[in-house]
Amino acid sequence: MARISEIVRTTKETDIICRLNLDGSGESQIQTGIGFFDHMLSGFARHGFFDLELRCNGDLFVDCHHTIEDCGIVLGEAIKVALGDKAQITRFGSCILPMDETLIQCAIDLSGRPYLGFHETFQVERVGTFDTEMVKEFFYAVSYSAAMNLHIDQIHGENAHHIIEGTFKAFGRALSEAVSMDPRVHGVLSTKGSL
Ligand SMILES: [Mn+2]
């Protein structure tokens, strides 16, 4: 069965459409109006081998907050819907990803219980028109709407572009592992019987 989803979400702040294929090839069409955020989302898709189409028409005349947060909500929802009953998935995924001086650790449990652990620090307030404080907000939104346990830790890093890009790539790779199918799993990988 195809693990795909389509989410449409419209509020007074943002208008978003998202199509996700968990078993894709890394192709993406991203259009959020925030160049650096587009760059990050395409890196997530590429390194997770997800096909992702994400278009957002947001209130960027206010600032980048609503657009980034709402894209996180919608991406998390798209992951949750595409996963369906989570039968046969590996469930856990992790990645330690280097990018020049930066080293990022990302660990995921698709447990059905939302939690974000986030430890990164930035020396600048923004990269392009992307506010660095929105990295945490984005992953908080993803973790809650996908109902995943997500831990992101900056082991090393100085350059904000590297830290954020390393985080999105590490998240892509960790999620790719967590959603991968394990033929040894019958039903769902939980002693409780559900995820
Ligand atoms: Mn880059």
Image: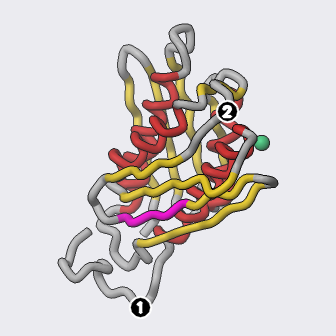
The front one of 136 and 183 is 136
Left-right relation of 187 to 13: left
**Which image quarter is the N terminus in?**
bottom left
Ligand 1 falls in quadrant: top right
Dominant secondary structure of the magenta stretch? strand
Residue at image location 41% in from the left, 16% down from the top: 13
* Residue occupying the point 72% across, 24% down: 128
Tell me if I can see residue 133 in this picture: yes
Residue denoted by label 1? 184
The correct choice, above or below, for 64 with respect to 52 in the image is: above
Tell whether position 109 is magenta: yes
15 lies left or right of 50: left
Q: Name the element at disc 2.
A: loop
Q: Residues within 10 Å of mark 1 (few under 14, many from 20)?
A: few
Image point 73% across, 43% down: which residue? 158
Visible residue check, residue 27: no
Q: Which residue in the structure is indicated by mark 2?
A: 123
Whether 69 is drawn above or below 152: the answer is above
Q: Earlier in the sequence, mark 2 or mark 1?
A: 2
The C terminus lies in which quarter of the figure? Answer: bottom left
